[in-house]
Amino acid sequence: MSFRHFAAVTAVAATFGFAASPALAVTEIQWWHAMTGGNNDIVNKLAEEFNASQSDYKVVPTFKGAYPDTMNAGIAAFRAGNAPHIIQVFEVGTATMMSAKGAIKPVYELMKDAGEPFDPKAYLPAITGYYSTSKGDMLSFPFNSSSMVMWINKDELKKAGVAEIPKTWPEVFEAAKKLKAAGHDTCGFSNAWASWANIEQFSAWHNVPIGTKANGLDGFDTVLEFNSPLHVKHLQNLVELQKDKTYDYSGRGSASESRFGSGECAIFLTSSGYYATAKSTAKFDFTSAPMPYYPEAQGAPQNSIIGGASLWVMGGKTADEYKGVAKFFTFLSDTNRQAKLHQESGYLPITKAAYEKTKADGFYEKNPTLQTPLKELTNKEPTENSRGLRFGNMVQMRDVWSEEIEAALAGKKTAKEALDSAVARGNAMLRTFEKTAK
Amino acid sequence: MEKSVVFNGKLLPYLLLAPQLAITLIFFYWPASQAIWQSFLREDAFGLNSEFVGLENYQALFAQPEYYTAIGTTVVFSSLVTVLSLGVALLFATQADKNLKGASVYKTLMIWPYAVAPAIAGVLWFFIFHPTLGTLARPLRFMGFNWNPMLDGTHAMILVVMAAVWKQVAYNFLFFLAGLQAIPKSVIEAGAIDGAGPLRRFWTIIFPLLSPTTFFLLVVNIVYVFFETFGIIDAVTAGGPAGSTTTMVYKVFADGRLGGDLGGSAAQSVVLMVIVIALTAIQFRYVERKVQY
């Protein structure tokens, strides 16, 4: 068989999902993901290593665009009957995936069926809690977990005469004013992920609810309530500071993270997973610090919640394919691999053993930046308000919340009006979701 | 004596029509009927359980204040894009129709943007005018103009209109140029001999003779702006800030794809379909009367 002929046959087989036919000895596992930059390389390397480690299965990673795009591509593929085996879904898509019984294969079931060694207690509860049922059954496999941290350009802070890294919001505002006076006239401080920063993480960190029913973890009949005086006050502060760009809005996603790397914004809140990119682009001394808080808020800081994504296994595949997926998950859980993954990417280690190993190796003494999110997550015993969140329709709801934040920052609405409207519109979406998810 | 060929039998004409009919049925009527059916259902994103809910999706749709905002935005966006892309293309076509050195180079360059996919066009414009990364946004800011499409709805609207127009001008240009070249030179020369200046020649001779092209393009452009611009909007502004560039078709896309609300999204598609059918019917009924073939 000529190479060209072989390639054509493989392409046809892959297209029609016949990859598992006995004519080809290797079973292909399709893995759709949303990782870019340094993290894309890590995904490809993981697949290569796994493929080299055994000869029965071949993991084929495919980049499918940003998080929402990847999730939609997976849903569309499922409807068309050719879903991939593994799909990386960001944490806000969790409720949607969970409710799609029959479309997914729960991870705990997958591991049991495949007979792979699997102990859910080996994983960090702060992370797996997000992806498990109330009974503790793990539904998806945590892959890249992160939390939100405050990235600091130490060189610029020094130049602006800010002696200490700010801890509270008022201190951040003061530092930003100094930075602005020292030449950062387009951005004193900023943040990526408008709603994740200012609504979701903000609420958990201050121990105030986003919604009832433990932020939706205890049921889909949850009602939003993030229009509390504290939320309004924070947004109001941002609105005031936006006027002269002491704070400057950076959009709904992570596209503007480069404002930190380029040196434009010297204080920037975004995911701890930004580490790999910061390391390769920032030409200055940088570090990460815990998110700021309002000192008058009782109990703040509480603990942060995770973001990032997990791997969902799609339903309707063959037993052999599932065995391959299970083996791949075991491969990913390996302590040394997890520790290395954590140290290179900045994402959190998902197993307790990997965390202990990194600590024991003395890694954090040299790289305190990577311990910041772990310290935030474990700062206090989680409460009803800080265990996590699970809202249906969250992907679009985030856009709606961001829209309202934008309306306030642009001066079209007051902070109070914007948050009231975000809550009302969000509740309407939750009720629609509740009707479809049975 | 006139020679004519006569085909007997009724089968042949139908056979000849069949491919076109099949395409129309499969690619137009079938999806349209699906959309109508879907708009009466409530279904989860994965299509695992669906339920017939009658007109509930429509009721929910018309109860949303955001939907009326989107209708308003659509009116502004589509008028601007249609008028500008037709106007600019006509201007360029009349200029390129002159006897110029290297005219074919200009013509080729003018047609290029049409080959660019909407999403890519959108990303280009997003980066050129990104408030902090953009190559053109920096000079704008440097000149003291507070350019910020991330928060200022008007700026964002200007940006998506520019991107959508840029993309469509190429297409319109091509048709206008062909239309201009089909106008007999003798008619224009006759006008010139009678003492009509260039502007007068344009408005009394060229423009009326161009009217079939203009009318065709008007219909095509309205369809374009109503249906095909969501890719550009998604890449440039994602409907923001604060919904100020969320047009009706973008909302169909956002609710269906991002929100997984297929019933609501289908109901919006049906409304959009009705509007475009009505607009096209009005055009054929009233505007076409003024067209001189």
Image (cartoon, rainbow, N blue to C red):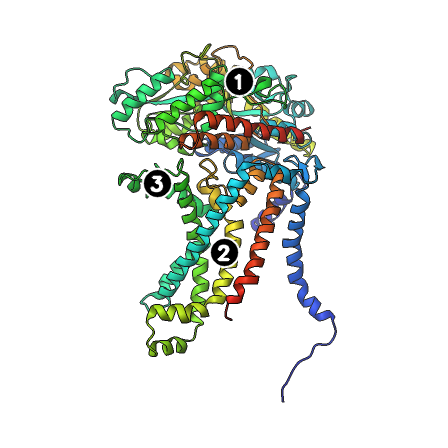
Kind of residue sitting beneath label 2: Asn
Q: Residue under label 1, please give it.
A: A209
The answer, for residue A78, to whether it is visible in the render is no
Residue farthest to the bottom? Answer: B1
- Position above or below: A401 against B138: above
User: What subunit carries mark 1?
Assistant: A
The x and y percentages for residue B251 are: 54, 41
Name the side, left or right, on which A313 lies relative to B110.
Answer: right
Could you say whether the residue bearing mark 3 is in a helix, strand or loop? loop
Kind of residue sitting beneath label 3: Gly
User: What subunit carries mark 3?
Assistant: B
Between the residue at mark 3 and the residue at mark 2, the CA separation in whole angstroms equals 29 Å
The quarter of the rendered structure image containing the N terminus of chain B is bottom right
Q: Residue under label 3, please give it.
A: B134
Q: Compare residues A403 and A10 and report the one nearer the observer.
A: A403
The answer, for residue A257, to whether it is visible in the render is yes
Residues marked 1 and 3, same chain? no
Residue at image coords 40%, 35% = B151
N-terminal-most mark, 3 or 2: 3
The x and y percentages for residue B44 are: 65, 34
Q: Residue under label 2, please give it.
A: B221
Q: Are marks 1 and 2 in contact (CB under 8 Å)?
A: no
The x and y percentages for residue B180 are: 42, 69
Could you say whether the residue bearing mark 2 is in a helix, strand or loop? helix
Residues marked 3 and 2, same chain? yes
Q: How crowded is mark 3: few (under 14 residues within 10 Å), some or many (20 or more)?
A: some
User: What subunit carries mark 2?
Assistant: B
- Position above or below: A205 against B120: above
Kind of residue sitting beneath label 1: Pro
Q: How crowded is mark 2: few (under 14 residues within 10 Å), some or many (20 or more)?
A: many
Could you say whether the residue bearing mark 1 is in a helix, strand or loop? loop
